Image (cartoon, rainbow, N blue to C red):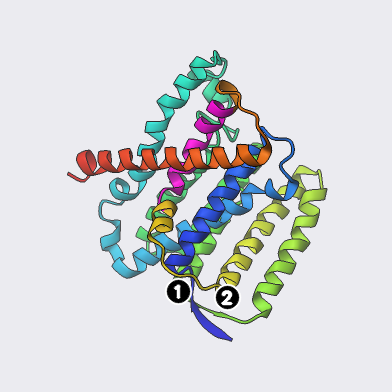
Amino acid sequence: MKTIDIFEKNKCSYLRIFLMVYICIRHLGDYESSIPFFLKQGFLACGIFFLLSGYGLMLSYNKKGSEYLQGYFKKRVLRLIIPLILVFPVFLLIKYGLGDLSGFGLKNYLKDIRGSRFIINYSWYVYIQIYLYVLFFFEVKKKNNQLRMLIFNILVVLVMFLLRFSACYYLSTFCFNLGIYLANKEYLKVNILKPLLSLVGFIALMVPYISLENYYIKYPIGIFACLAFALFTTYALSYISVGANNALSKMSSITYECYICQGIVFLLYYRILNIDINVVVNCLLCVCAIFILGFVVNMISNKIFKRFILE
């Protein structure tokens, strides 16, 4: 048995990029029917992103204490909102150019709030991330009660589940709580049985999740499958060693903006440019375009943040 530093920085850089590419391929499956089934389980990748978010926030709080909460909404939450504000009008312009005005208007937005494409395609992730950041702030401010945070999250997920929100809103959410739990441990004891058991558990849960149709059984199983996959990833990373790479580190820092930009790229590529070469080339071109656009959005949002928010 060995003791490891969970989520060492260089590993996280490679992991974030891999996850972002996987998610891009998953969403490409909305346009390409030939994308294989095992590449369409995007909620697993989102779970790892939430795991890393919870871990990073809690680790920073543990190191800095109450000082970390000073200007929290300005420094943390606004960083999530600014890229969304930048992308939103561009997305609307593209929809307008396509003549697709059917979803515009407050009434339609409220009607579609339960869907994964509320306002901007695939933007559900942004709203859940903001919710989790806000939840984290209020709970750590009240004596860092992890159990209360978990119970509150269970209640919110239960409401979304009963109201038939898109499953993407809640399948991976509890990985955030898992990340907070792991951050409080900081170092993890690992032996070969732990990744094997978590992998077996993941597979055992994914089989009924994939095969079942009953809404009230399928998606609760999916939540536990996502947690099992997050645990397996955590343990498996302990057996991987990577060196520092500045270029990859920079790429990993823009994955949030890349997520937001996917809807724009796919609309441009498939609806306006109407390009159709083959699935591999389409995938490569879209992923490259998403990272380039994500870099631009990240650069602009950082300048806005430094110029108008920090001053």
Near mark 2 (Cα within 10 A), the count class, few <14, some 14-19 or many ≥20, is: few
Residue 242 appears in view:
yes
What residue is at 47 percent from the left and 36 percent from the top? 261
Residue type highlighted by circle 1 = Glu
Residue 236 at what x, y percent from top left? 60, 71
Instruction: Give residue 98's position: percent from left, percent from top.
Output: 54, 16
Q: Which residue is mark 2?
A: 239
Q: Secondary structure at mark 1?
A: loop
User: Is residue 160 at all visible to an observer of this figure?
Assistant: no
Q: Where 61 falls versus 107 (above or below)?
A: below
Whole-number angstrom distance, CA of label 2 to CA of label 1: 17 Å
* Magenta stretch contains residue 261: yes
On the rendered image, what quadrant is the N terminus found in?
bottom right
Q: Is residue 231 left or right of residue 289?
A: right
> Which residue is disc 1 drawn over?
186
Which residues lie in the magenta part? 253-269
Viewer-nearest residue: 284 or 118: 284
**Percent from the top left, x then y, of residue 278?**
68, 36
Tell us which disc is closer to us: 2 or 1.
2
Whether residue 56 sits left or right of residue 234 in the image: it is left
Q: Is residue 159 toward the left or the right of residue 33 in the image?
A: left
> Is residue 183 placed above or below 79 in the rendered structure?
below
For the point 46% across and 43% down, the residue is 291
Amino acid residing under circle 2: Tyr
Residue 24 is a magenta residue: no
Residue 30 vertical position relative to residue 243 in the rendered view, above or below: above
How would you rate the neighbour count of disc 1 (Cα within 10 Å): few for under 14, some for 14-19, many for 20 or more? some
| Residue positioned 45% across, 46% down in the render | 256
- Give 284 or 119, whichever is nearer the viewer: 284
Image quadrant of residue 114?
A: top right
